[in-house]
Image: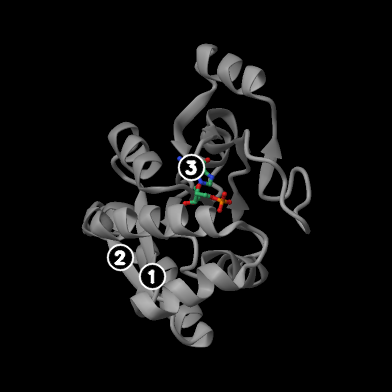
């Protein structure tokens, strides 16, 4: 059995990443999603255990101390981390998994798992990014400003990724990300056995 593939998806708040991911999971019902642990307060409409496990700072620090996190980061005053076990379980049982992390988390995962496929979701322009951030309406102006600064810092590091998908028209972005996920199956390192299959019998 071949190992599961690990996709990292990053993109600043306002890149439209959440909507993209939601549609992606409808298309790939067998794709696993890595549920992050965070100390950030739950926003309206969020559900415990769907995208995040909302935990206390103490619990987060104890996961960290017990080496239960594949990566972690502090973002705008809160901790976020990827629990290690679900990712390792998916890989060893041949299931594909998507990990949504910020650029720092992505860099930590790449160090430990160089084979990961990383995709950066880019907003189409600065204007659109600003508009999307202020439209959210669940956060104060100061927090929106902080998120904008963080977004620009993330975009500066987009060149660390294997793929960049511009999320302007949602349908097109979905097609583009689907193309990446599908074509990754055909990489030489996952298909090497096909060459041997024929040559061994020749
Ligand atoms: P938000 O608070 O808007 O849900 O997420 C803020 C940032 O944290 C986003 O850039 C998101 O990708 C990132 N993030 C979400 N989960 C994780 C995680 O497990 N680890 C890291 N490093 N970043 C995360």
* Quadrant into which the C terminus falls: bottom left
**Horizontal side, residue 129 vs residue 79: left or right:** left
Q: CA distance from mark 2 to mark 1?
A: 8 Å
180 relative position to 54: left or right: left
Residue corresponding to mark 2: 163
Q: Nearer the viewer, mark 2 or mark 1?
A: 2
Vertical arrangement, residue 33 with respect to residue 25, above or below: above
Q: Position of residue 77 (x, y in %)?
A: 51, 36
Q: Nearer the viewer, mark 3 or mark 2?
A: 3
Mark 3 neighbour class, 10 Å CA radius: few under 14, some 14 to 19, many 20 or more:
few
Q: Which residue is mark 3?
A: 76
- Of residue 93 and residue 64, the one placed in the foreground of this image is 64
Separation (CA) of disc 1 from disc 3: 30 Å
Residue shown at the point (63%, 65%) measured from the top left: 25
How far across and down, in percent of the image, does residue 58 sit? Answer: 64, 17
Give whichever of 1, 182 is nearer the camera.
182
Some atom of ligand 1 lies within 8 Å of the CB belonging to the residue at label 2: no
Query: On the image, numbered disc 1 is attached to which residue?
Result: 180
Secondary element under disc 3, as helix, strand or loop, is: loop
- Name which of mark 1 and mark 3 comes first in the sequence: 3
> Can see residue 72?
yes
**Quick one: label 1, few (<14), some, or many (20+) residues within 10 Å?**
some
Say whether marks 2 and 1 touch (CB < 8 Å).
Answer: yes
């Amino acid at each position: 059995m071949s190992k599961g593939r690990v996709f990292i998806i990053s993109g600043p708040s306002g890149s439209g990443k959440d909507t993209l991911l939601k549609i992606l999971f409808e298309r790939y019902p067998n794709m696993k999603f890595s549920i992050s642990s965070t100390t950030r307060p739950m926003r309206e409409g969020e559900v415990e255990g769907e995208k995040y496990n909302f935990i206390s700072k103490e619990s987060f620090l104890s996961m960290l101390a017990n080496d239960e996190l594949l990566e972690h980061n502090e973002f705008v005053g809160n901790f976020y981390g990827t629990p290690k076990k679900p990712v390792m379980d998916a890989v060893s049982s041949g299931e594909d998994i998507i990990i949504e992390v910020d650029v720092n988390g992505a860099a930590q995962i790449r160090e430990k798992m160089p084979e990961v496929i990383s995709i950066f979701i880019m907003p189409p322009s600065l204007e659109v990014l600003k508009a999307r951030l202020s439209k959210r309406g669940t956060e104060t102006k100061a927090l929106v400003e902080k998120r904008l600064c963080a977004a620009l810092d993330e975009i500066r590091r987009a060149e660390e990724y294997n793929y960049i998908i511009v999320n302007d028209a949602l349908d097109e972005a979905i097609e583009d990300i689907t193309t990446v996920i599908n074509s990754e199956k055909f990489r030489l390192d996952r298909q090497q056995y096909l060459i041997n299959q024929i040559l061994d019998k020749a």
